[in-house]
Amino acid sequence: MKPRLLILLCLLLTIGGATAWRIANPRERQAVSLESLNARPAPEFQLLDQNNRPIQLRGYVGRYRVLLYFFDPTAGPDADPVLKRLKDVHGALKKSQVMTFAISTPLSPEQKRQTLSYPFPILRDTLAGQPGSCSFAWGRAALAKGETGPAKITPGAFLIDATGMVSWNDKFPKPVEDAEGLINAILSGEQ
């Protein structure tokens, strides 16, 4: 047999084998969820953490998923069950390539001391409720007319994917319905 025919026969067998393998092993189709259709880029922010270091969201987007949790500081961070849970499972979340951030209005000196034991950044939004603030951009605070000082933050959790996208609900990002459920889903690999 001539070398050309031998090469042609080998190519034909290779292509035939690859085609048969692809037919036997079709690609998995990725389901498109309604959540992914409502995904838009997450609002950017730069806030100070409990150690007065500036933290920017854009420094983590593209490398990690981000679990963002807004909490009401009235009772303090140690009284918030979701923050306690995040503190307990922080290592496992980090192994799952999920960075955790908690955001509130400025804390009292006693509450600020509590935050020093947390292994993830607890950020303070000093402009909470004002149009340029992080909590306003995320739909977690609204300042009533005539009030002064930072607004009250409504608790809520958000999961920002590695590409920086988050689910939206009209004008603001949409918080997950159950923060504890989200944490459990991430830890079990479902999310």
Image: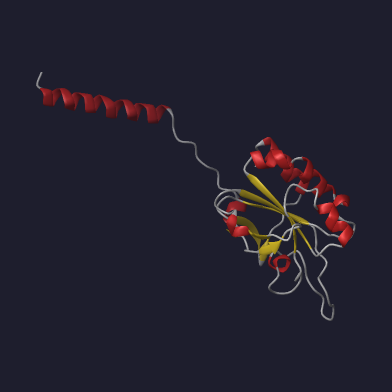
Asked if residue 191 is positioned above or below residue 5 in the image, the reply reads: below
Direction bottom: furthest residue: 146
Q: Which residue is drawn at 56% across and 49% down?
A: 63
- Using residue 50 as the reference point, say whether residue 162 is left or right of it: left
Residue 63 visible in the displayed image: yes
Q: Residue at x 63, y 63 (%)?
A: 43
Q: In which quarter of the image is the N terminus?
A: top left
- The percent coordinates of residue 95 (x first, y second) are 65, 38
- Using residue 66 as the reference point, say whether residue 10 is left or right of it: left
- The percent coordinates of residue 167 (x first, y second) are 64, 56
Q: Which picture quadrant has residue 74? A: bottom right
- Using residue 190 as the reference point, say whether residue 24 is left or right of it: left
Direction top: furthest residue: 1
Residue 39 visible in the displayed image: no
- The percent coordinates of residue 183 (x first, y second) are 73, 43
Q: Quadrant of the C terminus?
A: top right
- The percent coordinates of residue 148 (x first, y second) are 84, 77
Tell which of 35 and 101 is nearer to you: 101
- Using residue 187 as the reference point, say whether residue 13 is left or right of it: left
Asked if residue 52 is positioned above or below residue 85 in the image, the reply reads: below
